[in-house]
Amino acid sequence: MGKEPDISNESPAKSNEEFKPYISREESVAEFTIKAVLIGAIFGILFGAANAYLGLLAGITVSTSIPVAVMTVGFFRLTRRFFGPASILESNMSQTTGSASSSLASGVIFTIPALYLWGMDPSVFQVAGLAVLGGLLGILFMIPLRRLLIKHEHGKLPYPEGTACAKVLVAAEKGGAGAGNVFLGLGIGVIYKLCIGFLYLWKDTVYAYVPLVNKAQLGIKATPALLAVGYILGYRVAAIMVAGSLISWVVLIPLMAYAGEHLSVPLFPESVSTIGDMTPSQIWNRYIRYIGAGAVAFGGIITIIRSAPTMVKSFKIGVDEVRSRLARKNAIGPVDAPAEDRTDKDLSLRTVVIGVVIIIAVLALVPSLLGGTASLTMRLVAAPAIAIFAFLFVTVSSRIVGLVGVSSNPTSGMTIVTLLGVSMIFVYLGWTDAVGKLTALTVGTVVCVAASIAGDTSQDLKTGFLLGATPYKQQIGELIGAASSALAVATAIVILNNAYQFGSAELPAPQATLMKTIVEGVLESGVPWRLVLIGVFLGAVAELCSLPSLPFAVGLYLPVSTMTPIFVGGCIRYFIEKKHQGDTRTLEARCERGILFSSGLIGGEGLLSVGIALYAFYWGKPQGLGIVWPSPWGELFSLVIFGLLGFLLLKRTKLK
């Protein structure tokens, strides 16, 4: 112990037995302990709820492995007098358990809010059941791939978040700082949201019309979480996203306004108001969102097509690895000797197979999960479809995140392909009613959660591989994390809908709205396909201009007020990168400090947003202090406070 692990991923020669982890294979240190699992589950529940809020607000979620790891180390240090010192493997176990919840939340918020938008009212237990079954399925399907992707591909697949998390834990073991930035960000995020979302001391959103351009509008949602997301994403992605949003709000909306201002009747799909009577937000909601939906669907499918060679290779490798393990299990004699190594021992393949069979059987036989009132025949078709799509996309997700990281994992594209495939099967079988829509969407939910959590599990197992953790203990920790957070995430979603309503300005639930549009487009008529096709063509134009179409499409699809604070955060990151362009060590240190502080901001705002929603659920919407700012002073004050927050983010990246 004490030797820095080789986490550069530059030496394929050290991909197998030659690799020396931070904790040697021969050492036996505390790892799977009650305090590690319990603290990880608690932090996971907190960050899972915060990530659910962020995804419903901006359509984006972030990896929480590093902030959970840092907070765990900080907590263990503060409580060492009561619980005793914690080993680095206990800290890793805690972050492994905790990070599972954030990826589970990502999968749920991409689909479930669509049920509320259809006027349905899924119970907390149905949502939690789908979440936990999808989470367990994703983890179990990933287990047979661990030895190939994590061990044998070491030096080829970098797994960026997993490698970074290992670095953070090693630095913390040697006395590195960082927890303070996360906790400070949490505190500021809570206080800021308290001021704008409970006390209403100043406005959280500022709008301004563009002179001389009919109904063109700019705005900024001045909140900590969106600023932090922009910093984490970086300048290029943030700039592409805000560019898409500007096209919607200063080009497409004015064009719609000019073209429709003389119409005396509503234009489909609107049936009440004419375009001339509509505000920019109403035009965006009734027309531009369909254009954005077409662009996002195109971006997701293009991402899948671009990843097709990797997908085919990954799927083949996954199947071959499962066959190889089955052959070793059926062989005579101690063929699988390396499995005796503590750092190379997975949960048994028998456990995996039994677990998968039980999950698929539960999905097929329990009526309240898939479709609620779906017939047994429909469920017997849907459950095997889940198994097929989940195995395919778990295999793909586990490998793709090894190359590009969790944040760039095209989970939405995988979900779109799943929904299109299942919906087409249902059309062929004549299941196009409300029950068919509900069942198709819940199939997408389970597959989305499975693919999302498989990527997170892969990163965690990479961290464990570098540190010398025991794989089967980590896998049990992942299963516990998914199971323990499912009910909390489901409860948060129900409470947030009751307080803010999905599809509203407060919580637009963009990804779920997109999935709803896709299912409706296949199973029923009434979708304005001309608008959707315009979005497809705009996505194609972005690709022809060598721009990644998915971030551009997300910007096209979301309000400009959501994208502008993300762009500000990206500009702060860009300033730091330009300033230290030739000093890699300083740049990495400052970026890491900023990411930790930003993670805290996201967690703080998200947690208090759920708290405010809980308050509204029981006692009604907060009334605030009744402060009324005269225009334009209220807008100016909001911008000043947001500017100070941005300055603080920049200041917290500085090295002491």
Image (spheres, rainbow, N blue to C red):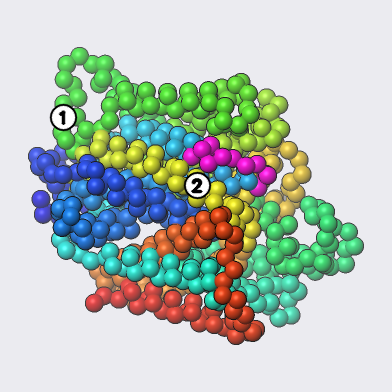
Residue at numbered disc 1 = 340
Tell me if 563 is positioned left or right of 402 in this view.
right
Figure quadrant of residue 14: top left
Confirm whether the magenta stretch covers residue 119: yes
Magenta includes 650?
A: no
Residue 517 placement (x, y as % from top left) = 66, 46
Q: Look at mark 2 in the image and give the residue it sits on.
A: 491
Q: Which residues are magenta?
A: 117-128
SS at badge 2: helix
Residue at image location 84% in from the left, 62% down from the top: 274
Taking the image as shown, residue 344 lies to the left or right of residue 438, namely left
Instruction: Please state which amino acid type lies under the numbered disc 1.
Output: Glu
Residue 320 or 528: which is nearer the viewer?
Answer: 528
The residue at 31%/49% (across/down) is 40
Q: Nearer the viewer, mark 1 or mark 2?
A: 2
* Cα gap from disc 1 to disc 2, whole angstroms: 42 Å
For disc 1, the neighbor class at 10 Å (few under 14, some 14 to 19, many from 20) is few
Q: How many marks?
A: 2
Vertical position of residue 13 compared to residue 531: above or below = above
- Residue 628 appears anywhere in the view: yes
Can you tell which quarter of the image residue 220 is in? bottom right
Q: Are marks 1 and 2 in contact (CB under 8 Å)?
A: no
Callout 2, which amino acid? Thr
Q: Position of residue 207 (x, y in %)?
A: 63, 74
> Quarter of the image holding residue 175?
bottom left
Q: Is residue 438 left or right of residue 141?
A: right
Sequence-first tag of 1 and 2: 1
Q: Position of residue 72 (x, y in %)?
A: 27, 55
Residue lying farthest to the top in this orientation:
332
Give me the residue at 68% from left, 38% from top. 522
Q: x%, y% of residue 512? A: 59, 48
